[in-house]
Image (cartoon, rainbow, N blue to C red):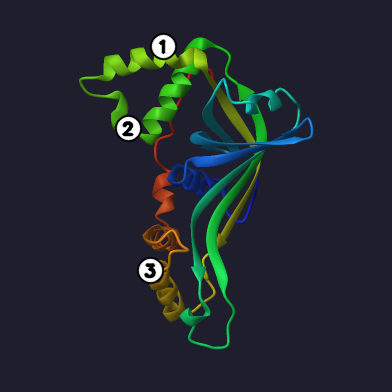
Amino acid sequence: MTVEVEGGDLELAAALLRRYPLCELVDFVEDDYLVSRVPLTVLKATEGDLTLLGHVSRTNPHPRAWPRPHPTLGLVAGAHTYVSPTCYERQPAVPTWNYCSVKFTGRIELIEDGEDSFEALLTTASEIDPKLLYGEHMGDTLSYYQKLLPAILTFRYHIDQVKITQKTSGHRSDVDRAAISAFASRTPFSSGDDYRDLVEWLDAGQWKATAQAEEPSASGT
C-alpha cells in the first residue's frame, strides 16, 4: 500500500512525529466522538509504508472503535505562535497564527500476541526515553512492565493518508521572519523557543537527519 502524502513527504511526516510524539487519536462510534492523547512511535517509514506503534490502557474506552472497518484520525500538533501585525515591515497588516501540524488517517491493528505486545511497549518506551531500559535498574523495570502488560493494549497504526501543514511565514522577508521569531519568544500565546527551533529545523533541513535515523523494530512486523 502506498501512502498518500500532501504538503510534504513521508520522511518529513515521520520526522515531525518523532519530534512531537504525543498525538491525538479521534474516532466516531455509536454517535459519540472518542478522543485520546497517545504517544506514538514510528515503526516503519520506508517505500511508501508508514506504520506507527502505540499503546493505551485497557480502561480507555477508545479501543471499542478499532474493530470497526473505518479509518482512525491522528493529529500531531507541533510548535505554534500568534503573529502580531507589528512584526511586519509593511503596514497595514492583520494578525495570524503560525503552526506546523500533521494529520494521519489509517487503520488500527491491535497486537494480540503477548510477546509482540511486550516488545511493542519496550519499543515505544525506549524511543521516547532511551536511557530508561538501561542501567542497574533495567531488570526491575522489565519485570514491572511485564506485570503491567495485562492492563495495556498495544497496537500498530497503518497509515494510508498524511497531510502536513507548515505555516511559518516562509513567503515573508528575512526581516519579518526574524521579528516573528523574536515575538514568539516573548508572547504568552506561543510555544516560545520551540517555535523558533522548529522553523530553523525545517529551513535547514535538519529533519532529514532524523528521518534517516535507524528505524526501531518490533516482533511480528
Question: Of discs 3 and 2, which sits in the foreground?
Answer: 3
Taking depth in this image into account, of 43 and 2 the one nearest to the observer is 43
The residue drawn where x is 62% and y is 32% is: 158
Q: Under tag 1, what secondary structure?
A: helix
* Type of amino acid under label 3: Arg
Q: Under tag 2, what secondary structure?
A: helix
Q: Quadrant of residue 187?
A: bottom left
Residue 89 on image: x %, y % = 48, 86
Question: Residues at badges 3 and 2 in contact (C-beta under 8 Å)?
Answer: no
Disc 3 to disc 2, how far (Cα)? 32 Å
The residue drawn where x is 44% and y is 73% is: 180
In the picture, measured across the screen, residue 43 lies left or right of residue 74, that is left
* Type of amino acid under label 1: Lys
Q: Earlier in the sequence, mark 2 or mark 1?
A: 2
Q: Which residue is mark 2?
A: 130
* Type of amino acid under label 2: Pro
Q: Which residue is mark 3?
A: 186
Taking depth in this image into account, of 72 and 36 the one nearest to the observer is 36
The residue most toward the bottom is 91
**Does 61 appear above or below 187?**
above
Residue 107 on image: x %, y % = 67, 31
Residue 169 on image: x %, y % = 52, 71
Quarter containing the N terminus: top right
Q: Which residue is mark 1?
A: 147
